[in-house]
Image (cartoon, coloured by chain):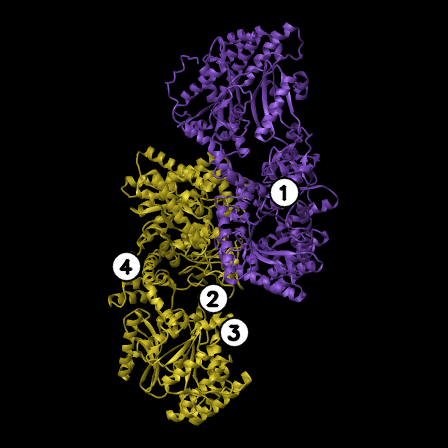
Chain colours: A yellow, B purple
Amino acid sequence: MAKCAKQKASPKGATKGKQYVFFFGGGKAEGDGTMKPILGGKGAGLSEMTSIGLPVPPGFVITTEVCKHFYENGKKYPDGLKEQVDAKLAQLEKVAGKKFGDPKDPLLVSVRSGAAVSMPGMMETILNLGLNDASVEGIAERSGNRRFALDAYRRLIMMYGSTAMGMERELYDHAFAHIKKTMTAPRLGLKEGDKIEDTMVNEQELEALIGEYKKIYKQGTGQDFPQCPMEQLWGSVNAVFGSWMAPKAVTYRSVEKITGLLGTAVNCQQMVFGNVGEKSGTGVAFTRDPSNGANIFYGDYLYNAQGEDVVAGIRDPIHLDELKKTDAKIYAQLCGVRKTLEKYYHDMQDIEFTVQDGKLFMLQTRRGKRTPQAAFKIAADMVKEKLITKEDAVARITEKDIQGLFYPIIDPKISPMELKRKRVAGGVDAVPGAASGQIAFSAPDAEAEAKKGKKVILVRHETSPEDVGGMYVAQGILTATGGKTSHAAVVARGWGKTCVCGCSKLNIDYKTKTMIVGEKTYKEGDWITLNGTTGEVFDGQMSLVAPEPPPEFKLILSWADKIRRLKIRTNADTPLDARKARELGAEGIGLCRTEHMFFKDFEIPEDSEKRQLAIQEMILSETQEDRKKALQKLLPFQRRDFVGIFKAMNGLPVTIRLIDPPLHEFVPKSPAEVEKLSKATGITPETIDARSDQLHEANPMLGHRGCRLAVTYPEILEMQVRAIIEAAIICAKAKVKVMPEIMIPVVMDPKEYKLLDEQTRAVAAEVMKEQKTKVDYMVGTMIELPRAALLADKIAENAEFFSFGTNDLTQTTCGLSRDDAGSFLPAYTDEKGAAILKADPFEVLDQDGVGQLVKMGLERGRAGRAATAKAAGMPDKKAWLKVGICGEHGGEPKSVGFCHRIGMDYVSCSPLRVPIARLAAAQAVVAEGAAKTAPAKKAAPSKKAAKKK
Amino acid sequence: MAKCAKQKASPKGATKGKQYVFFFGGGKAEGDGTMKPILGGKGAGLSEMTSIGLPVPPGFVITTEVCKHFYENGKKYPDGLKEQVDAKLAQLEKVAGKKFGDPKDPLLVSVRSGAAVSMPGMMETILNLGLNDASVEGIAERSGNRRFALDAYRRLIMMYGSTAMGMERELYDHAFAHIKKTMTAPRLGLKEGDKIEDTMVNEQELEALIGEYKKIYKQGTGQDFPQCPMEQLWGSVNAVFGSWMAPKAVTYRSVEKITGLLGTAVNCQQMVFGNVGEKSGTGVAFTRDPSNGANIFYGDYLYNAQGEDVVAGIRDPIHLDELKKTDAKIYAQLCGVRKTLEKYYHDMQDIEFTVQDGKLFMLQTRRGKRTPQAAFKIAADMVKEKLITKEDAVARITEKDIQGLFYPIIDPKISPMELKRKRVAGGVDAVPGAASGQIAFSAPDAEAEAKKGKKVILVRHETSPEDVGGMYVAQGILTATGGKTSHAAVVARGWGKTCVCGCSKLNIDYKTKTMIVGEKTYKEGDWITLNGTTGEVFDGQMSLVAPEPPPEFKLILSWADKIRRLKIRTNADTPLDARKARELGAEGIGLCRTEHMFFKDFEIPEDSEKRQLAIQEMILSETQEDRKKALQKLLPFQRRDFVGIFKAMNGLPVTIRLIDPPLHEFVPKSPAEVEKLSKATGITPETIDARSDQLHEANPMLGHRGCRLAVTYPEILEMQVRAIIEAAIICAKAKVKVMPEIMIPVVMDPKEYKLLDEQTRAVAAEVMKEQKTKVDYMVGTMIELPRAALLADKIAENAEFFSFGTNDLTQTTCGLSRDDAGSFLPAYTDEKGAAILKADPFEVLDQDGVGQLVKMGLERGRAGRAATAKAAGMPDKKAWLKVGICGEHGGEPKSVGFCHRIGMDYVSCSPLRVPIARLAAAQAVVAEGAAKTAPAKKAAPSKKAAKKK
C-alpha cells in the first residue's frame, strides 16, 4: 500500500489482541451473519454473501466494538487498530490485484457506516477513496475513459468535503450548477430552463469543476484536499464513527427506541462502478413484492449510473422486468442471486447491486421491509414453499404487523405535506388507529351529540371512570395529561378506540368549552382528527381507511395456537367486548372490571343514570343500612351485566374483579351533577360536597380502594358476589356453561385475603341455598402490591388463582404514579438522557425489578398452595394455583414471553391485542426451541476467536 | 365431693388426653411460671409461690387453652374437661381436708379469671362458692361466728348474681342500703346522714338481706339461687370464659394493643377469710416503692376484712409500717415472703395476701407496675444487690419508661374529673408530652405571635414543609388529618414537640380563623392544651410539669451502650437538634433533611423569607439558566446550615439527604403568598398559579420527587453537593472533623444511581480542586422503593452505604399512603375488626412483608458491593456496605431489634428517641443471648407433658 508523509508506518507484527477488523473477499469471509452486533447489518450481509459464493467486491469491516471503545475513551481508538487495518488493507490489495494509492492502477474503495440496525441519520457513504491528482490520470488511462475518472474524482472531493468534513453539500452543488450554466449550456446551445444532465458535462468542464471543488474544500476546511489515500481513508473512518453521536442519529434512535447497540461498524470495500458505460448500471430490488407479498422479483435498475444516482432520482430507472428484455444474462444471474439469498436467509431480501462492464456485483442484502399484509403472505407462502417452518412463520410476524391489520388509518392518499400542514399537536400514541370527529368537552356532551348521530372526539384534561359513557360513544379520545397506561388509554385500548394522551400543548377550558392549541382556538363541535398510531392531532376532518386482514392472518394464527402453551384471555367489561374478543381468539375473560358498570349501562343506555345515582347514593350513605339500600338498587343492574357476559363467554372462564377504584372517583364533581344527585336523594349539596371533600385523598393510588373497601364496607362485596352468583345460576338454568372466577383486588395480606375469601364463599353458599342450584366458581386474587407477592405462599393457602395486576405492581414496585410519571419518565427512557430504563415500565414489563416480584409471587404461590393442598388432601386440580396476568403488559409481546417463561397459565389483554398475545405466546415457545439449539450456532464466532489466540 | 341431681357423675378414669387442669397445693404445683401463656399470670404465680414454699391456699387452674377451644367450638368445652375438673377438685378436697358441698364443714372456693396479661374489663372474682342454705349453718357452727357465715353467703349471692349472671350490682346494693336504713339505723338509733358500716349490720338483718337477695336473684334470672355447689362452680367458670369476649374486655385489648393471647384461665382456689376477727385481715403490697423505686416494703393492710373491701375503700387501711408495730409476727413473715419473691422473680412484685386467724396466706404475686423513675432505680439497685445482671436491667427498661422521663406532662394534680370536663376532642397520639398555648391557624401567624413572646399551638388541617417555621416556634401541633407518620408527626417528633394528629372532629376554617369542635367555636388566640401521650385536646390553659431523669438513667444507658452492637444515629436537620441528640447519645446523624432549610433559617430567622423566595423562584424558572441563578441564592444558606451541623457533630458522621419532596410542596398556596412571590420575582400571579397547577400531581408520593428531581434538574444536585463539600472544607480548615455522607433519595434503578453518584463525585472533585483542599466523604442512597431493594446488588456496586427509608418502603410495599390510611387502617389493626395486621406498619416495621425487602436489600447490597470490591481490589473498608435505617421505625424497639438481627450497622431516629434506640439495641443483644440459653428452660413444661403421656 502507498505510504504518505503524514501516515506513520505500522510496526510489523502488531496485529495482536482482539480482532477489530474482519476481511471478506475472494469467496471467503472472516465474519458471518451471527456477528451482526459487531459487524453491523451491512458488514454481516457482505461477509455472508461472500461466503455463499455471491459476487461481492472484497473489503473489510471495522467492528462496532471500535465505536464503543472510541466513545468510552475520549475518542481514541483501541491499541492495534491501525495495524489491523493496515493488514486487512494489504489483504484487500492482494485480492483486488491493485495497490491503494498506486498512481497507475489504484485500488479505489468506499467507506460506509453500518450499525446492527438500519439507521438513517448516520453518515452513510464516501466513494472513490484512493483517487488523487496523480491516480485520477492512472484510472483515466487504464479505463480509457478520462471523463469517468474525472467524474469519480469530483464526486470524491464533494462527498469527502460534505460527508466526512461536515461542509454544506450545497456549496458543491452550486459550483456544479454554475459550471453547467456558464460552460456546458453555452457549449451545447441550451436555453435557460432546459435540463442539463450531469452526463452532458465534458472533460474540460469536469476539470474546471474539480478545480472549483478544491477551492471550496480549502475554504471550508482551511486545508488542501488530502492527496494521501490513507489520510482519506482515516478521515472517512473518523467521520463514520463521529456520526454515531450526531444529534440526528441520537434523535433517530431515541424516537425509534433503538437501544443496546454498541455503535456503528465501518465497511471498507473495493469500488465497483455502474457508470462506466451502457453495459454498466446499478439497481435495488426486493425478492418479493413488499406491498402485498406476491412472489415476484420486484425492483428498479438504472443504466450507466452509480447507486447514489438512483437515490437522488437523477434519471427514471426501469423495472426489473424490462431488464429481463434488455439484458437477459444479468437478469438471469440476478434471479439466481434472488433464489440463493431467499434459500440462505429464508426471508424476503432487500438487495443493492451494481453491474460493471457486464459483471454483476452485490453490494448489500438485508431483510426487506414489508407491509403487514405482505408479512403474512410471505410467511405463509414460504411455509408452502418449504423455505421455512410454521414455527419460523409464527416467529417473524410482529406486533406492528397485527396492529396494522385492525386499526383504521388516515387515508394514505393524503400527502405527507398536507398532513404536516394540518398537524396541530403531538402527544402520546396511546392506542393506535385513527379517528375523525367533532370536539366534545364532557362525557354528557359527547353522549348527547352521539345520540344525534354525530361523530365525536372526547377531549378531556384527563378521564375518570365517570367519563366512560362519553368515552364509549366517542370515535376517539384526546387528553392533555397521562401516558399509555392512564385511565383514558387503558379504557380506550380495551375498546380498540383511538386515543392520544398527554398532549400537553392543549389548553382546555371546560367553562367556555374551548381549547387553545398554540395560536388556534377550538370550540365544541369543531372537527379534529387523531392518529393514535403516531400520537398526532390534526385540524379538521380527514378520510379514514379500514385495512382488511389477509387470508393468511387466520392461517398463521392457527399455527400459533397449536404451538403456544399459554392460554390467552381478554380484559372485557361488556358482552360486546367479550364477543369481539372471542372472535379474535380469546379463551376466557381474565379481567372484567365491575366499576365501569356503575356508570354506564352498555345495553340499555337509559339505565345509565339510575346506576350512577345508586352508586353515588351508596357512597354518600352515612349508615350501613342506607348503604345496603343503595346497593340493593345496583344489584339487578350488575346481575344483568354478568348474565350478558356469561352468555357471551359460554363455556369459557370469566374472571370478575370486585370493585377496585377509590370511592371518590364516583362522587359527582360538577355543580350540575351535585344538584342532580341532591334532587334524586334529598341530600343537600353542602353535604354532598362535604362528603366529597372527606373522601379526597392525597395519594388515591395508595388509598382506600380495592378490597380495602370490602374490609370497611363488607356490604359492597356481598352485593357484588350475590350479583355474580345469581347471574351464574340464571345462566346455568338456561344451559349456559358458566365458569365465574371471583377476583379480590389490592390484597396486601394473607389474613385480609382469608377474611374476604370466607365472606365471598359465605355469600355464594347463601345464594345457592336460596336458589337451590349449585354452580362451580373459584375465588382468587390480584397480586398487585409487592407485599402480596412477598407473602404469596400464605395467600395461596386460600386463593385458588392469582392474576398479576402488573400496572399497579409496577407503580408500587418502582414508586411511579402512571398518572404523573409523564413529567419525568421520558428523561429515564430517552437515549439523549441517561437511558436509565430500557423502556417505559408501563408499556413493557420491567423484568429486572417488577419481574422478580412476579416470579417470586408465582413460585411462592404455587408452592404454598401445593403444600396446603397436600396437607389437606385436596385433589390435584385444586392443588394447582392458576396464575395469569391482567395488566396492560398481557398484550405486549416481550412481557408475554416473560409470562410464558416463568410458567403462567394465561395472559389477558384488551380484545384487539388478543391476536398479538396469541402470536407472542407461540413465539415464546419457538424462542425456547431456538435457545436450545442455539449454543452450537452461537459458539461459531467465539471458536474462531479462540483459534486466533 | 358433693353430687347434686343436676350434675352428672363423671365416668371414672376419664382424665385422658391433654391436660387442661393444673393443681397447686400442699407445697407442690403441676404448673410453673414458664406456663404463663396457658395458666395465666395469676395461675402461674399461685403455682410458683406454692412450689417455692410460700403459704398459698390450694386450688387448680383451668387453662387458657380451654378458653380458646370454647370460642373455636361454639362455646363447647373440650372432651374430658369435666372429668379433669372433678379429679382436681377431689385432690383439692383431700389437701384441704374438707368436702365441696359438705353441709357440716364445706370446702369453700373462689373462682377468678386470669389471662397471661393483666386485663381489667374481664370478669374477675366470685368468692365463697360452695355455700348454700345448709352449709352456711355448718360454717356458722364450725367458725362459731354465724354473722360471718351469713355475711359470706350474702356476698356469694350478690357476686354470683351480678358477676356470673350479669345482673346489675346496684339492685343488690339498693337492697343492702334499704336494710341498713330500715333496720340497722333504727336499731342503733342513727340519724339520717350518719354512716352505717357494713359491720354494724347484725345476724337478723343479714338473714333478712339474704332473703331479699334471693328474691332479687330470682327476679333477675328467673331461677332460684343454685343450691348445688357444682352448679355454682360451673356457672362461675362459664361466666369467666364468657367474659373474655365481653365488649369491654375486647375494647380493652384493642386499646392496649394486646394480641396473641389464647384466652383467660380460670383459677379455682380454697377460700381464706380475712374477715373472721381482729387477728385476721387482708393486704396488698409492693416489694419496693413503685413511685420512686426506693428499696422499702410498701403496702396497705386492712384488719378484719376481705380483699374486696380494700378495693371498695370501705375503711381506711393502715400502712405496712404500722402492721410491724401491731402484728410483728405477720410482718416478719411478710418480709420473708418479700425477700423470697424478689429473690425468686428478680423483680419488684405486687402481692395480695390474707391473714386468717393469725395465719398468712398468699393470694397473688405479679410483676409490680412502677413509674419510669422507679423502673430505673429498681433495675439499677437490683444490679447492685446482685439480684440481676446488667443485661437483665437493660432488658427490663421499656420504651415508655424512657418516654416518661423526657416529655412534659399535664400536672398530675389536676383531677381526672376536671380533665374529663375540659376534654374537647381526641386524635392520634402522635408525639408524647403535653403543651398549652394560644391557637394560631397558619405558620406565619404562629411565627408572628411567638415573636411577641406568646405560647402558640399551631392548628392546621395538615402540615407541609412550608409550615416548618410555624411548627418550630409552636409549643405543640394539632392537625385534623394524618396519623403517626404524617408530616406533622414526623417533623414534630424530630423536635420532641407534642403533636396530636388526625383529630377529625376539628372543623377548621382558615378564612375566618376559627375552628369548630362539637358545639364549641375556637378563634385565633384561644387557649388549648394538648396531651400528645394520649392524643387528647383540652379546653384552656393547664399547668405542665417537666419530669427529671433519675441518676440511674445514665447508668443503665451506659450499660446498654456497652452491650449493644448497633450504632445509634439521629435524624436532625438543625445544629440545635444535632447537639440535643448528641447529648442524648447519638453517634452521628443518619438523616439530615435538606428541604426544611429551604423554608426556615433556624439560626437567623430574618433570612427565612429570603430562602423561601429563592426556592420558589427556582421552581418557577422556565429555563435552566434562571434555575441556576435562583439556586445560586440558596447555596450560601445551605452551606451555612451544613457548617453548623458539621460543627455540632464534630468527629461524627453526618448523612445528608439531597432534596426529596416534590417541588409543588414548595410553591406558594395562598393568594397573599403568591402576591409576595410575584412582587419579589416579577413573575405574574397568573403564571405562578399556572405553574402550580402544572406541578400538581395525582399521587405525589409516587411522583416527581427525590432523585428524579436530580435527573431532570441536575443543577439542584450540583448546588446541594457544592454546599455540602464547601461546608465540609470550611470546617476542615477550622479543624472540625467532618464525615459527610451524601445520600441520594428515591432511587429505583442502578443506572439511575450510578449517573447521580458520578455527578455527585464530579461536583465534589471540582469544589475540592477549587479550594485546594481534600475532605473525605461518602456517597450512598436511601432504599425506599421495592425495586431498589430487589436490585440492591447492582446499586451497591457504586453506592458506599444504604439507608433504609422504611416510611416510604412501607408505603410502596403495602400500597398504603400514610396520609390516607387513617380512613381504613384502623379496621386492619383493630381486634374488634379482623385483626389483619399485628400493628400499624408505619409505627412498627412490618417484618413479615416490608422486612423481607429490607433483609433482601441488605443481603444483596452487601454481597453486590463485596463482589465488586473484590473484583476491583478495593480495601476492606471500602468493600463493606454500611447499612442503616432512617425511617420512623429507627426509634421503635421491635423494629430496632429486627435491624440488629439482620445485621445493620446503625439505626437513626429522632433525637428524643435516641435513648430508646440505645436501649432497644442492647435489648436485642440480650434477647439473642436469652434465645441461646432458652431451649433448655423452655423445654421444661413439655418434658413434664411428655412424662404424662
Tag 3 and tag 2 share a subunit:
yes
Which element type, helix, strand or loop, lies under badge 1?
A: helix
Give residue A65's quadrant in the image.
bottom left
Residue placed most toward the observer, B527 or A361: A361
Residue placed most toward the observer, A19 or A326: A19
**Mark 4 vs 2, N-terminal side:** 2
Q: Looking at the picture, how far across and down is residue A396, in whole percent?
A: 33, 64
Query: Alpha carbon of mark 2 to alpha carbon of mark 1: how far?
Result: 54 Å
Q: Tell me, for residue B915, which label it has, or none.
A: 1
Q: Tell me, for residue A254, which label it has, or none.
A: 2
Q: Amino acid at mark 4?
A: Trp
Q: Amino acid at mark 1?
A: Pro
- Dot 4, how many residues are within 10 Å of its Cα: few (below 14), some (14-19), or many (20+)? some
Tag 4 and tag 2 share a subunit:
yes
* Labels 4 and 2 touching (C-beta < 8 A): no
Q: Looking at the picture, how far across and down is residue B827, in whole percent?
A: 50, 37
Q: Tell me, for residue A401, which label it has, or none.
A: none
Q: Residue furthest right?
A: B452
Label 4 sits on residue: A559
